Image: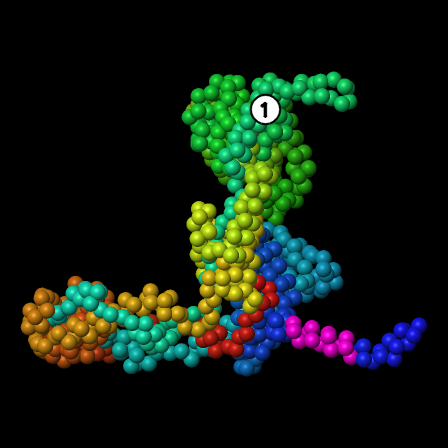
Amino acid sequence: MAILNKIRQRSLILILVIALALFAFVIQGVIDNPNAFSNSQGVVASVNGTDIEVNDFQQKVKNYQDRAGGRISSTQAMNAIYNQELRKIILDDEYEALGLSVEKDEMRELLKNSFQSYPEFQDANGNFDVNRLNAFISNLKDISPDSAPLTSGGQSFNINYDIWTNNEQSIASNALQQSYYNMIKAGVSTTIGEAKDEYMADAKNVDIRFVQIPYTTIADSLVEVTKSDIKAYIKNHEEKYKADASREVVYVEFKEEASKEDEDAIKAELLKLKKDRAEYNESSGNTDTIPGFDTVKDVEAFVNSNSDIKYNDTFLRVAQVPGVAKDSLMKLEVGDYYGPYKDGEYFKLSKMIAKEQMPDTVKVRHILIPYAGGQRADASVTKTPEEAKATADSILAKIKSGTKFLDLLDLSSDKVSNEKDGEIEFAYNAGMAPEFKEFSFDNKEGDIDVVGTSFGYHVIEILEQKSFNNAYKIATIARKIEPSDQTLQDIFNKMSKFEIAAKDGDFTELAKERELTLKPITFKELDENIPGLGSQRQVVRWAFEETTDEGDFKNFPISGFGFIVAKLVEKNEEGLMSVEDASVTALPEIKKQKKAEMIGAKIKATSIDEIAKNQGQSPKTAAALTMKNTTLAGAGVEPKVIGAAFGLEQGKTSKPIDGEKGVYIIEVTKVTEVTELDNYTSIMNRLNTTKRGAVQGKVYQALEKAADIEDNRAKTVY
């Protein structure tokens, strides 16, 4: 009790101590992770002061992926939505600054233009009815979040109020964008002076004599390039050598692959399936004989219960027999086996079930009864699948009772074949509905029946079968080649031992000792793919974490593959490229500059002939050069040389010109002047069209470049 009283007396001190401890904990968290309490945690990006919120962004990404039907990765979806949101904010700022908006009357006209062809918004005469449109929108709002059907181009689809409002916003946004760019285009024009220059660049020409001293006349070994030279070159070409933050990583792979022992075990299991086996039956107390592949009667059930690939009960033509074992399979007699053999990711055991002579081409005639929702069914089709089947059955009954097939063709919706008495002739490899094809080839001439496909129900009569060849029915038991549990454990142990050894050893040497291939890769912060491994954002995120230092390594599980152990080799922050990275492109240019100086220092003569003689080169000529064509005959693309030629008077010789392939000295031998045009309107119109066509892309690029963008994607959603 005395102790409790003392605690109560010191309660204020205890509260202060606890508060100080919590404060220290929070401060330490901020020191360890300065971004932990940043507003950026809930903001994907901030554009000109407008935030792209995480929750809204993620919902849009999800909707985008849903619409794509799984055809794109999450990172691709995020990039698409990010660019979409970025563009919207940047352009909305422009619209607001200019006072651009879509008014009610204009919006009504836009909706009319967008939806006037929809039958739901048309009156009895097929004219657009705004009252029907308003009623439809009102109904969507009332039943939200449920949807209502719409028809476009004969196809029906469902739409809810959220989708409709998004469509309206998109229509309005497109209209604003068009108005904005039209305003800019209206201010873009070509002057008479520009048109005149364009004409002269095409029409005026010069002839020259020249000598080229190629850079290759000086060996690379004679040119010394220092780190200081490369640094200076980078500084003078900063725009070219700007680099995003990147991380250099090396990694080794530990693939979860089946061992030879695993493969041998799979093959042995397949072979065991051939023989009957004894199995104790607990219910009867007897030992039953379970039929094997040799004796089983129900082949389909046997294959489906023992194979990773379902049984195919159809006859295969030669072209359809698996290529990896085609020759061996076609030589089998009925009842014989081939295998186990490897086919891609599977080991297979195949048994010849039957051989027959079957047609490769058939001629049939048919009557098609479609149903609503069937493939290519137009808006006039109202029958349900059950009603379509009943109609087809009644037609078949009439034919069997004596009514002529041709007399019933008017009931068919296949107007193309109807023009040919309902007849269709096609080969086995034609792109027909599988059920239609199966009936036509697997039955006999004269057979007639109702067959259902994705198009509806067909009454099909087989008229002719020809080009008979061998066809094979093959039963195949397939087992996927997968590593056993023991192999998986061995691979994990191998990876773990490598990691343990790497703590005190050299990563590269350990990989070499264990015969593991060291694979290098460089990431930017928003990258996702590793060649051969697909999207691996986990590795990129780790490499860019502030707590990950150069030399650190970590293992990563890779779905459907196994593991990798990655090591961070180097951190490259945003800025200019390093000397080493830049030297790949800088070194050749610097050598070219130094060689140009060395060549220039050797040129003492002033005439083309003397310079050519002294430098061991031959004088060359080029005729009818124009400003529009920068290719110099016999030398290649040389814009500096062409430009210099138009800056010289006839009979004058240039100073040395540092070109792309060498140093040039040129002499203008002839200038062909041209008569000015009386009217440059056509050229002005052509240039106006070109300039205005480029406005949209260039304007947005300029706006994006000028925007104040804080990109937090790597810290929030990636």
Q: Measuring from the top left, give residue 307's x and y in whole percent.
A: 59, 31
Image vertical order of residue 413 relative to residue 214, above or below: above
Image quadrant where one finds the C terminus: bottom right
Q: Residue at x 20, y 75 (%)?
A: 597
442 w.r.t. 555: above or below: above
Residue 313: quadrant of the picture: top right
> For this rendering, which residue is in front, 400 or 356?
356
| Quadrant for the N terminus in the image | bottom right
Q: Which residues are magenta?
A: 16-29
* Residue type (three-letter) at the residue carrying disc 1: Leu
476 to 16, vertically: above or below:
above
Q: Is residue 25 magenta?
A: yes
Q: Is residue 344 visible?
A: yes
| Residue placed most toward the observer, 17 or 606 | 17
State the SS at label 1: loop
Q: Could you tell me residue 397's position as x and y percent?
A: 64, 26
Task: Examine the rendering and report whether any part of residue 671 can be seen.
Answer: no
- Per the picture, the main secondary structure of the magenta-coloured stretch is helix
Q: Is residue 608 magenta?
A: no
In the orientation shown, which residue stands out farthest toward the front? 2
Q: Give coordinates of residue 712: x percent, y percent.
A: 57, 70
| Quarter residue 488 falls in | top right
Residue drawn where x is 23% and y is 72% of the image: 594
Residue at 50% in and 51% down: 533
* Place of residue 444 in the rendered image (x, y in percent of width and height, measured from the top left): 53, 22
The residue at the point 54 percent across, 71 percent down is 711
In the rendered image, which residue does mark 1 sit on? 273
| 66 sits to left or right of 339 | right
Front position in the image: 457 or 379: 457
**Counting other residues with Cα less than 10 Å from the Cα at mark 1, is it few (<14), some (14-19), or many (20 or more)?**
some
